[in-house]
């Protein structure tokens, strides 16, 4: 059988059913009790995309003859294994907007740049959107992300790109959008059948002022009928957004959601900056997921996330991280979001530990997306979504051999690293730092061409 670290044909990739990861230097994960766990010198057996067994290195010898592929993680200084990271809030088809909305001068406002962004978005074709989403997904994969929640209104394009990149996706389709006036709940529901092993359905409302009370009641009925559907909303992002909800509904966003019966474990609120202490307590009581976007909030001057309030109400297990889009962040690296969180909350009454940040990128993200029983950990029974990091790398070395949890601190502090390999659902999609399924050179050329064409199209 072949031994990784290979470049192997597409036919071989499709035929790999059983993988043995041999002699991993370190596994960084959370255990059955959600505690950060670091183990040395382990081998992992994977079959049909599921982790079957984790064993001390050396015990795997009897299994080698029965597997399709052996990945020797002990070569060239060793490998650090982490769960694939989870990005709980992104806008993949906006990737073509990179550089197009740079503020003209220091006196331009964020809202002015967003007006330009919407003009570009409305000029995009389905082919533009698909190429853009593919650029977004592949960039995220190269930085260790295996699972993304997409908040957008282009299911055909987003899902086509996700299938090509082989990334795990919750595709939350807009029912009330600032960009697409034709978005509706009826159209979004029609996409629920277009799912597979990697793609799950979702709904999104851009902000609360975009939806009527009648629409919210209809959303509740849909979610009662389809128990696997997630609803995500930009909520509490700015003071203006909260005031718009009050102007439309006579109530703050959380009050409106509470009256509509939508506060539950399948609701995901992104940004979540401008909430009162009582609102935060209510969100925790109803097990609502929250996505922290520190870089986006800082760039757009939205305000600061009240981590200490969530901590005080014992609500940190449902806090995940997100990148937002390329107009809100320099690169789509979820690890740098963890580092931004560390810096932002460094002087808080309840500072955020590296272990907590690691959970935000892994099991918390899975929990927020209501899939914590299947992804977010390297344990038997979980999906084989795994990031492979080179140990002999400046992102990790030097570290304290007696305290290997320092590897987590190093990984986060030196954010922006590229994975050596990446596995999603038991299949390698990044191999030797290159995408195994996508010709990245051609993709970059197409992204540039479409970007220029869009700028010309809108003048």
Image (cartoon, rainbow, N blue to C red):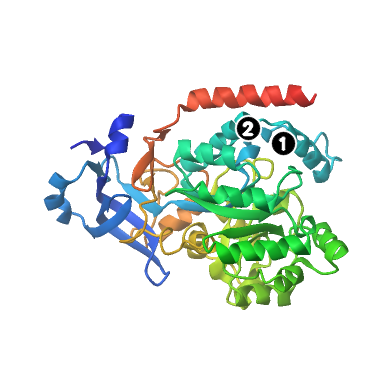
Query: Is 193 situated above or below 453?
Result: below
Q: Which residue is mark 2?
A: 126
Residue 220 placement (x, y as % from top left): 65, 65
Kind of element beneath mark 2: helix
Q: Quadrant of residue 114?
A: top right
* SS under mark 1: helix
Q: Quadrant of the C terminus?
A: top right
- In this view, the residue in front, 245 or 392, is 245
- The front one of 378 and 404 is 378
- At 62% from the left and 59% from the top, the residue drawn is 231
Report which residue position mark 1 lands on: 121
Q: Kindly report which numbered mark, 1 or 2, lies closer to the viewer in this rendering.
A: 2
Residue at x 82%, y 45% (from the top left corner): 111
Q: Nearer the viewer, residue 7 or 247?
A: 247
Cβ atoms at labels 1 and 2 below 8 Å apart? no
Q: Residue at x 29, y 52 (%)?
A: 25
Q: Position of residue 20 (x, y in %)?
A: 24, 48
Tell me the tag on residue 453. none
Q: For this view, does 82 lie left or right of residue 359?
A: left
For residue 313, what is the image quadrant? bottom right
Q: CA distance from mark 1 to mark 2?
A: 11 Å
Give the percent coordinates (x, y) of residue 329.
65, 44
């Amino acid at each position: 059988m072949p031994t990784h670290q290979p470049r192997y044909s597409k036919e071989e990739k499709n035929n790999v059913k059983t993988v043995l990861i041999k002699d991993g230097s370190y596994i960084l994960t959370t255990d059955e009790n959600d505690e950060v766990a670091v183990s040395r010198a382990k081998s992992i057996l994977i079959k049909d995309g599921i982790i079957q067994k984790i064993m001390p290195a050396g015990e795997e010898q009897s299994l080698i003859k029965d597997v399709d592929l052996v990945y020797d993680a002990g070569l060239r200084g060793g490998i650090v294994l982490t769960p694939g990271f989870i990005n709980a809030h992104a806008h993949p088809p906006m990737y073509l907007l990179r550089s197009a909305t740079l503020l003209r001068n220091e006196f331009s406002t964020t809202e002015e740049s967003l007006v330009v962004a919407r003009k570009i978005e409305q000029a995009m074709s389905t082919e533009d959107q698909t190429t853009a989403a593919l650029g977004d997904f592949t960039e995220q994969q190269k930085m260790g992300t295996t699972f993304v929640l997409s908040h957008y209104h282009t299911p055909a394009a987003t899902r086509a790109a996700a299938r090509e990149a082989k990334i795990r996706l919750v595709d939350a389709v807009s029912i009330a959008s600032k960009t697409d006036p034709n978005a509706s709940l009826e159209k979004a529901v029609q996409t629920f059948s277009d799912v597979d092993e990697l793609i799950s359905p979702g709904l999104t409302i851009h902000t609360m002022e975009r939806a009527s009370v009648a629409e919210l009641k209809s959303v509740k009925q849909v979610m009662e009928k389809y128990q696997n559907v997630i609803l995500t909303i930009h909520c509490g992002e700015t003071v203006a957004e909260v005031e718009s909800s009050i102007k439309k509904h006579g109530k703050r966003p959380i009050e409106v959601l509470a009256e509509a019966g939508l506060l539950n474990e399948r609701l995901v609120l992104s940004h979540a900056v401008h909430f009162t202490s009582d609102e935060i307590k209510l969100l925790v009581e109803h097990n609502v997921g929250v996505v922290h976007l520190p870089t986006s909030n800082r760039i757009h001057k939205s305000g600061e996330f009240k981590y200490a309030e969530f901590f005080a109400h014992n609500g940190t297990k449902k806090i995940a991280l997100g990148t937002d889009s390329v107009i809100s962040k320099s690169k789509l690296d979820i690890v740098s979001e963890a580092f931004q969180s560390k810096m932002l909350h460094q002087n808080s009454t309840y500072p955020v530990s590296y272990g907590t940040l690691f959970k935000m990128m892994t099991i918390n993200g899975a929990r927020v997306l209501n899939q914590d029983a299947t992804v977010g950990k390297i344990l038997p029974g979980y999906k084989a979504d795994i990031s492979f990091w080179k140990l002999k790398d400046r992102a990790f070395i030097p570290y304290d051999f007696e305290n290997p949890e320092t590897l987590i601190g190093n990984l986060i502090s030196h954010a922006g690293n590229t994975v050596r390999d990446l596995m999603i659902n038991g299949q390698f999609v990044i191999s030797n730092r290159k995408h195994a399924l996508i010709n990245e050179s051609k993709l970059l050329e197409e992204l540039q061409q479409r970007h220029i064409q869009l700028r010309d199209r809108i003048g």
